[in-house]
Image: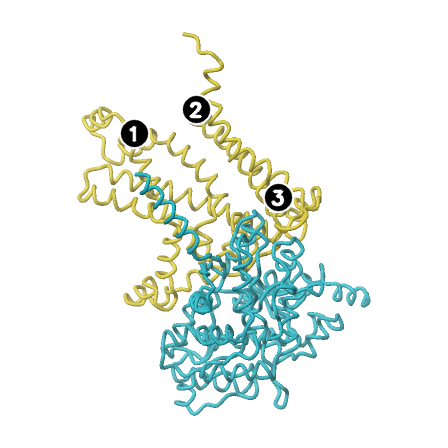
């Protein structure tokens, strides 16, 4: 049966229309806006590549590269914990451990809590005077470990990263569990008959067969790490304090474009230029990264 | 059936005719909701069938949300706006997003100084609602307990801090996580320690940020941190409110708007106020006083007539009386009856007599350009200084580097020095 083009168009056009309206147009508009200076009101003034020059080499470069490094840090930490830890927990939860079903539900619970609530909960837990974490450390005699977690350079960014991991790890566990449960049971049976121990089963069967899942998740983590905003905003605010030590590209963009307390420039054009740079960084790197992982998985 | 239909139409018409006009208002001051409920009652008592729908936003998010709504042709009828001169409000005026009220409202109950904060090109763009006074608020009961008196000099304030600290009370509670509050503290200290004359010379470009006095000011604050509560860099203003209200801390650098919250948390608290003392005896202390904001009329309002009725009321001493009685803030309109609250009367008196005419935080030209002395330099800079990442001199250098990018009097000075 031959499908007529007009039938294909009939199904594709509505989706294409909305995709253009909500994805293509905003991206195109952002690219266009990045060549202007505009405070959000009044006339826009064309500045050419000035915004990009200011961000990469000018007075804004310090703040920009500070945020870039923090986004990279987010990526590495998320990769290690969200992939590594999620894999280990997923293996545990797919085995016959006691309370498996309860833990399966519990690990995903933070994922359904809104980020505003996550920010509120953790701000209370991390309060330097009466927060549960410092109180617990003091209770067990580890007073010296009690810290102003979100108030000092040494711990602020890592604390934000850890809260983010706490919130998101359930999703990665769920995906890993699906991948593990998809492995044919025969493989495990055969391995056990051959006398394989659990560690061999994990390293020789489960791990290799979940690598494609891991690759997909790694790409997602890469993209999400460079677009992170909400967790930083919820915990350290638009100022990304203390003194920008938790600043990421998302908060830098928000401050720059929309202003508000702690704003840097309040220029939509400059903000759009940041978005364009993020886009240019993430898209090609994602493609290269996906390609490398793909080749590796095929042994090329 | 026909009768029922006619009855239905008549009822609908009657309901439409008697339905009150709802005026929507947006603000960053969530605490003002009760004020507008009371205004609504008064207007209705005067026969105006107007309802006021008040919506409060987080201060950090308010400006961008309001601006985007107005720019998009939507938003409320009335908006809380910041001061003039100021980048955002000026941009709104220039873009015609808020309307001039000179022809519509009688401004006879406002002083010229207050009106300056809403005037551009000879036209008024809002109804000022409050003035704010910043300084040091202290717990009178704690001071009495240890026989302490309001300090006249910076050293006397340090002596008080020593006494409190040795008795297990945090001398100061600093919300170090909220950079704006640290800048406000710097600015409140600056008007007394540096003095209005010094700030005037700075704004005129006769001196600059590398002046020894500015570095000295930074150092004084940096040295004060030993009297802040433990782990102060992770605390926010709500922590401070609780700690001060319940006597964990003896003093806070803050604004009069905090008094309402402290009283709500602890109705028994006795709050005192003093201007930040100068570092030399005999020097005149000053208070940091600024107009908090105004209520502007949106160009997008479809209910201008009703919105103007609300604004007319907001320009009367009656409104000022409601406002100050509910919020415990000082109203911008003159002639209001202040509530019988000692702290409010005291602060009002100070505002009338000792307001610094020159400032470098809100209400100053120095924070209207970019990079701003406030949000771009002192906000992250003070946090960095308190965390020992930079020295007071380095903070001064950062101020110099940032402001010399756009502040013309400073540029002129630096050019003349070359």
Mark 2 and mark 3: Cα distance apart in space: 39 Å
Number of dots carrying numbers? 3
**Mark 2 — on which chain does it sit?**
A
Q: Which of the chains is cyan?
A: B
What x and y, as percent, mark residue A217? 40, 36
User: Tag 2's secondary structure?
Assistant: loop
Q: Which mark is residue A216?
A: none
- Judging depth in this view, the residue of A201 and B99 nearest the camera is B99
Residue in the image at 50% along x and 34% along y? A286
- Judging depth in this view, the residue of B65 and B312 nearest the camera is B312
Q: Which residue is mark 2?
A: A299
Mark 2 and mark 1: Cα distance apart in space: 17 Å
Mark toward the start of the polypeptide (2 vs 1): 1
What x and y, as percent, mark residue B175? 47, 69
Colour of chain A, in one word, is: yellow
Q: Is residue A145 above or below residue A13?
A: below
- Disc 3 packing (10 Å; few <14; some 14–19; many ≥20): many
């Amino acid at each position: 049966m031959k499908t007529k083009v007009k039938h294909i168009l009939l199904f594709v056009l509505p989706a294409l229309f909305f995709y253009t309206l909500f994805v293509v147009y905003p991206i195109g508009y952002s690219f266009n806006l990045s060549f202007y200076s505009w405070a959000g009101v009044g006339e826009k003034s064309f500045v050419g590549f000035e915004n990009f020059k200011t961000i990469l080499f000018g007075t804004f470069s310090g703040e920009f590269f500070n945020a870039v490094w923090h986004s990279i840090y987010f990526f590495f930490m998320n990769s290690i914990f969200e992939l590594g830890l999620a894999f280990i927990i997923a293996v545990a939860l797919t085995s016959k451990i006691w309370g498996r079903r309860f833990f399966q539900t519990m690990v995903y619970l933070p994922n359904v809590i809104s980020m505003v609530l996550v920010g509120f909960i953790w701000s209370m837990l991390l309060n330097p005077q009466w927060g549960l974490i410092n109180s617990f450390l003091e209770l067990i005699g580890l007073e010296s470990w009690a810290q102003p977690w979100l108030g000092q350079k040494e711990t602020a960014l890592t604390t934000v990263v850890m809260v983010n991991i706490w919130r998101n790890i359930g999703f990665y566990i769920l995906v890993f569990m699906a991948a593990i449960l998809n492995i044919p049971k025969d493989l495990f049976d055969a391995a056990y008959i051959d006398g394989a121990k659990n560690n061999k089963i994990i390293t020789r069967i489960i791990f290799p067969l979940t690598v494609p899942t891991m690759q997909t998740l790694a790409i997602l983590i890469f993209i999400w790490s460079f677009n992170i905003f909400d967790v930083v905003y919820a915990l350290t605010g638009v100022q990304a304090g203390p003194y920008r030590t938790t600043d990421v590209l998302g908060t830098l963009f928000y401050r720059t474009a929309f202003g508000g307390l702690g704003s840097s420039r309040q220029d939509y054009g400059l903000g759009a230029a940041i978005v364009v740079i993020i886009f240019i960084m993430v898209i090609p790197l994602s493609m290269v990264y996906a390609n490398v992982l793909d080749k590796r998985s095929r042994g090329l | 059936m026909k009768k029922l239909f006619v009855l239905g139409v008549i009822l609908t018409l009657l309901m439409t005719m008697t339905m009150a006009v709802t005026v929507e208002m947006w603000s960053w001051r969530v605490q003002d909701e009760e004020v507008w409920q009371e205004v609504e009652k008064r207007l209705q008592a005067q026969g105006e069938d107007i309802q006021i729908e008040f919506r409060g936003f987080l201060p950090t998010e308010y400006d961008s949300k309001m601006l985007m709504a107005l720019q998009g042709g939507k938003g409320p009828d009335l908006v809380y706006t910041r001061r003039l001169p100021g980048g955002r409000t000026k941009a709104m005026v220039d873009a015609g997003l808020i309307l001039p009220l000179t022809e519509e409202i009688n401004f006879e109950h406002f002083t010229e100084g207050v009106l300056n904060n809403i005037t551009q090109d000879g036209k008024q763009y809002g109804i000022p609602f409050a003035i704010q006074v910043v300084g040091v608020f202290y717990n009178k009961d704690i001071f009495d307990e240890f026989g302490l008196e309001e300090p006249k000099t910076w050293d006397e304030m340090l002596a008080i801090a020593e006494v409190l600290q040795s008795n297990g009370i945090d001398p100061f509670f600093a919300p170090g996580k909220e950079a704006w509050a640290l800048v406000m503290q710097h600015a409140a200290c600056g008007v007394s320690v540096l003095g209005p004359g010094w700030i005037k010379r700075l704004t005129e470009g006769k001196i600059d940020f590398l002046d020894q006095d500015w570095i000295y000011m930074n150092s004084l604050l940096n040295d004060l941190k030993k009297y802040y509560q433990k782990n102060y860099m992770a605390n926010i203003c709500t922590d401070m409110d609780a700690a001060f209200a319940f006597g964990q801390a003896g003093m806070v650098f803050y604004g009069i708007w905090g008094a309402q919250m402290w009283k709500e948390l602890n109705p028994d608290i006795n709050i005192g106020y003093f201007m930040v003392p100068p570092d030399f005896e005999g020097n005149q202390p000053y208070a940091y006083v600024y107009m908090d904001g105004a209520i502007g009329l949106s160009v997008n309002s479809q209910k201008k007539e009703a919105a103007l009725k609300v604004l007319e009321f907001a320009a009367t001493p009656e409104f000022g009386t409601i406002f100050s009685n509910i919020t415990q803030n000082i109203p911008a309109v003159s002639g209001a009856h202040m509530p019988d609250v000692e702290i409010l009367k005291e602060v009002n008196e100070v505002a009338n007599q000792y307001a610094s005419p020159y400032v470098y935080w809100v209400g100053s030209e120095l924070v209207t350009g970019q990079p701003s002395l406030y949000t771009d330099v002192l906000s992250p800079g003070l946090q960095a200084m308190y965390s020992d990442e930079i020295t007071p001199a380095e903070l001064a250098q950062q101020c110099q580097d940032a402001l010399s990018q756009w502040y013309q009097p400073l540029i002129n000075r630096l050019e003349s020095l070359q």
